[in-house]
Image (spheres, coloured by chain):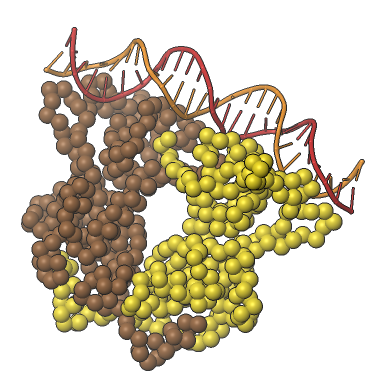
Chain colours: A yellow, B brown, C orange, D red
Amino acid sequence: MDINENESTYTSRKYRTPDGAPSDIVIFTITTTEKHTTKKALPIRELQVLLVQRKQWPYDGQWALPGGFCRETESMYDCALRELQEETGVADIHMTYLNVYSTPGRDPRGWIISHAFTALVHERLLVERRADTDASDVRLFTIEEALALELAFDHREILNDALQRVREQMLTTTIAKEFLPEEFTISELYQVIQTVVPSFEEKNFIRKITSTQSRQGIIEEVLDRNGEPKLSNRYSQRAAQLYRFTELTPQLSIYS
Amino acid sequence: MDINENESTYTSRKYRTPDGAPSDIVIFTITTTEKHTTKKALPIRELQVLLVQRKQWPYDGQWALPGGFCRETESMYDCALRELQEETGVADIHMTYLNVYSTPGRDPRGWIISHAFTALVHERLLVERRADTDASDVRLFTIEEALALELAFDHREILNDALQRVREQMLTTTIAKEFLPEEFTISELYQVIQTVVPSFEEKNFIRKITSTQSRQGIIEEVLDRNGEPKLSNRYSQRAAQLYRFTELTPQLSIYS
DNA sequence: GAAATAGTGTCTCTAAGACACTATGAT
DNA sequence: ATCATAGTGTCTTAGAGACACTATTTC
């Protein structure tokens, strides 16, 4: 039984201890680019990931996920928050723990157990960063670009895991709100879902999402101060109804 | 930027490194107890968790989750598998990574970052263990009992997190199969779901689960070698149809 | 009128939900 | 006959899915 081993580990330090426990953060954002047509049109949206270029051994010059070593005085989550803030100046965002990466030999510096987090950041929160930082060593890449690069360590695997997770969560939770303004149109929501999950397609999306009872009121219409429906014509000639997410968190089940 | 810190950590070891990275395993099982009635009846099922009694400082004498320190030559998952096997003699079971526990001060032995896993084990796989081991230091507890104990470290928090996870997964994935024999009746399935998620209730459960298309064929009827429906009268006078899980993994979505 | 987005009308068909009813076989 | 489990019959209503159609505004 290992309890005895534990004890001797503690008392005599006869077993090797890890050389570090960093966190790595997969920061996703959706960029929007206006189409230059004569008419108003929906923007082009792309899922992008933030990478930093390494300046030292190992993997000198290669792109990697931002991150850094945990300190004794902080939890892994706090470590990731701190690193995220140091890299992007962003706080108070949706960050979830992804997985632990501990395959022996994954880091040439020694026995290093990495903890990956996934952060979803609205594009506008990354705008300041661009002004602050030298754009050459911290950059956004589209997913296709990032996966085509030779990333440092096992960061390609981490990125793939994070992608899978964010795609699953996009369809089963309301994280779409992390990529949207407070008030949004149905088209915007649909575009965001499709940007993250390209295979997503619902012919009667507006019908399903607005037919209450079935969708249990995940979103609701926004009214202006006169109680009239609030509309937006940012993307279209005909103004569209604005919606917001409610507090409701949907409970999915395969048995009901 | 922490990349510099990383490098100096590596070159000069001027930063403190963790004192250990263990894994802790929450092993759930569902026990079945026959009712002693005159007629055949469904058994009583209870969700139970395996705990071990500590024999050393810290938390000497208190109950804790089984687990132990990771070695440099293995991944965290391998570590959990090894510990699980050492504790219970069980291999090849459904084990998923739960979370990392790294709050400073969580372990009086030092800076110890724990990785929790959740394992689902069929009752019959724990039977041998009972014969092998001294029953006084390794025992199954019902969830209520376990949560009423003063568990070592932050194991109460881990147990609560694991419970929440297994409840969610019971409703959204087919992990019910981990607690069931290969072939089972609808009542057994229903009981297993209710044992893990007491609030679960579906009036027309048999209707919904067997009406194909809606449930996308998660389960299928078992036929005997003559192509006739295979029945079981273990729990009832009237024999019940046996079912098995298919390979299908359901894709849930709040948007469709 | 053409373009681009935002919806609605209307049909069919499946399934959810409720609940009373029948079926089986041992004691 | 009774009990405990295992189903079925039948009705109502909701909504999924398809797809053609209308609406709004600017160029």
The location of residue A219, given as percent across then percent down, is 56, 44
Quadrant holding the C terminus of chain A: top left
Q: Quadrant of residue A254?
A: top left
Looking at the image, the residue that sits furthest to the front is A226
The location of residue B242, given as percent across then percent down, is 32, 31
Give me the residue at 64% from left, 41% from top: A227
Q: Is residue B75 above or below residue B212?
A: below
The location of residue A165, given as percent across then percent down, is 48, 57
Give me the residue at 24% from left, 60% from top: B155
Q: Is residue B57 visible?
A: yes
Q: Is residue A74 left or right of residue A191?
A: left
Q: Is residue B181 visible?
A: no
Q: Is residue B43 left or right of residue A254?
A: left
Q: Nearer the viewer, residue A80 or A14?
A: A80
Query: What count of labels does the image hold?
Result: 0
Give me the residue at 55% from left, 41% from top: B256
The location of residue A39, given as percent across then percent down, is 82, 53
Quadrant holding the N terminus of chain A: bottom left
Q: Nearer the viewer, residue A4 or A79?
A: A79
Give me the residue at 51% from left, 38% from top: A216
Q: Is residue B20 above or below residue A202?
A: below
